[in-house]
Amino acid sequence: MNVHIIRGAARMALLGTALSGLAACAVAQSEAPRPTVQQVEDKQAASTPVTPPVAAPAPAARPSSTASELQGLIQNRQVSELRTAYNGTYGASLLFKPDDLTYYVALFQQKDFWRVLKTKSEKQAEATYRAFTSQSAELAEVDIKRIKLQAEYAHAEKLLASRSAELSALQADRALRLQQEEQVAARQEQSRQEATALADQGKDVRQQLRDMQRQIDALQAQQAQVAHTPVQKRAK
């Protein structure tokens, strides 16, 4: 009986010691300084393998064309211009490369190549040139018509401006003439009114003159009569 009690006590003592050790470890871990965010990132960066940068792919080279080839030959003066026909903004050219007897036939618009044929056959080059020339003429019909209509429109605008200026001048002349006619008519009416008034005044003056003349005549007659009458008679 005592033996069991002693063994139980010993077990309890060992369990208490183990629990005390775990508690101490927990306290030590809680008191230990925690790593910062920068330290964690540095650790992750150090553990991450470095990947070398991938070089950007080189741009694909433009495919060479007969048009670009001809442009290079023209710039280097390696071809001779045999024929060129212009139709509006379109045209056709026949060029010859003498070092290898090669013909180039080009259909262009505003100096930009549209279609280019490269051939060793003179017959094919001539036929193609004629075809391109005819095609450029057909393509240029709209442009040529536009150019003519634009010129006609500009001429019509110029003519309209000239006619408008002429009409404005005629209207100004008419307005001036009417104004002058109104002024002349007003002056004539004023002159007529003044003439009428002067005529009436003249009648009045003449009538007054006649009246005054009668008075003068009467007085003169009286004076003459008095002058011929003897003094004695006048005294009586």
Image: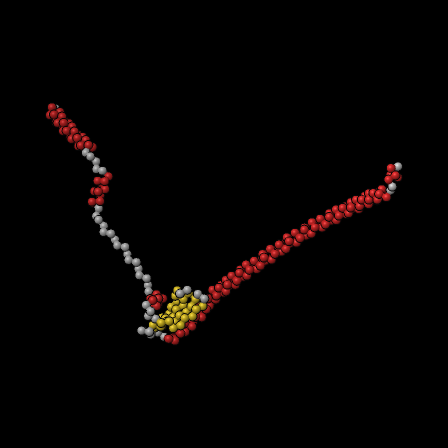
Number of numbered callouts drawn: 0
Residue at the extreme bottom: 123
Question: What's the coloring here?
Answer: secondary structure
Residue in the image at 28% along x and 56% along y? 57
Inspect this view and state whether residue 194 appears.
yes
Q: Residue furthest left?
A: 3
Whole-percent x and y of residue 209?
78, 46
Residue 6 lies, with reference to residue 105, above or below; the image says: above
In the image, residue 92 above or below residue 230: below
Is 172 in front, or is 70?
172
Q: Position of residue 124 (x, y in %)?
A: 39, 74
Residue at the image point whose x is 60% and y is 55% from the top = 172
Relative side of 81 to 182, left or right: left
| Quarter occupied by the N terminus | top left
Residue 199 or residue 68, whichever sits in front? 199
Residue 30 is left or right of residue 231, and the answer is left
Using residue 60 as the reference point, say whether residue 2 is left or right of it.
left
Q: List x then y, in percent, for residue 39.
A: 21, 40
Nearest the eye: 122 or 224? 224
Res. 107 image quadrant = bottom left
The residue positioned 24% from the left and 39% from the top of the image is: 37
Can residue 119 be seen in this snapshot?
A: no
At 64% from the left and 53% from the top, the residue drawn is: 180
Write down the quadrant of residue 24 in the picture.
Answer: top left
Q: Quadrant of the C terminus?
A: top right
User: On screen, 54 above or below 76?
Assistant: above
